[in-house]
Image: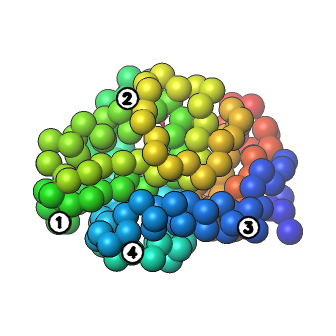
Amino acid sequence: MMHKDLQEILISPEELSSGIGKLGERISADYAGRCLTLVGVLKGSVFFLTDLARRITTDVRLDFMMLSSYAGAQSTGVVRIALDLKESIEDSDVLIVEDIVDSGLTMNYLLPNLKTRRPRSLEICTLLDKPSRRKAQVPIKYAGFTIPDKFVVGYGLDYNGIYRNLPYIGVLKEGVIEGN
Ligand code: 5GP
């Protein structure tokens, strides 16, 4: 049953599951025999990260970061680290796990930041890729789904903090978004 605030379901639970299964197979093959550190970007990636980790057959470690944009700086990509990694990533194989890459500014900040910590390898895995609004080119190694330029919620993605627990990715009704 679709949430009343949504106009459409873009990606069903079944599609999410099979898409994430395919990502897990690719990642398992690429990192076979190695221990992979999954770096989840809080909070949006949490549902994706826990499902993806269970579809990876090589050993994984989990760590987390929380990033927040400076007020009014969304378009400039000035990002603040609100919560940093617990462990060192020096000499580790690191995979950043993100919910969605939109403008690319967040990853454009995070990637060089993590590179200075000298991981053995560093790649990006995003559940959703919204390429139409890209401002910074981001080298995405793994993308689950490419989506059109619509504001989506569910499966970790929020609007004003809610809708994260929806088991699918959906598009909000226009009237629900402030200012419409
Ligand atoms: P970027 O820096 O690539 O523009 O965007 C990264 C962040 O913007 C994402 O991690 C996410 O928090 C937010 N974002 C971008 N597009 C959407 C969207 O369609 N829905 C939601 N809920 N968040 C989005």
Q: Is residue 49 left or right of residue 91?
A: right
Q: Which mark is residue 58?
A: 4
Q: Quadrant of the C terminus?
A: top right
Visible residue check, residue 6: no
Q: Is residue 144 left or right of residue 73?
A: right
Q: Which mark is residue 87?
A: 1
Kind of residue at disc 2 = Gly
Instruction: First in sequence, mark 1 or 4: give its number.
Output: 4
Task: Give the camera-side residue of 68 and 93.
Answer: 93
- Examine the image and state in which quarter residue 28 appears: bottom left
Visible residue check, residue 76: yes
Q: What residue would you read off at disc 3?
A: 13
Q: Which mark is residue 6?
A: none
Mark 2 CB near ligand 1 (8 Å cut):
yes
Give the foreground label among 1 and 4.
4
Instruction: First in sequence, mark 1 or 3: give its number.
Output: 3
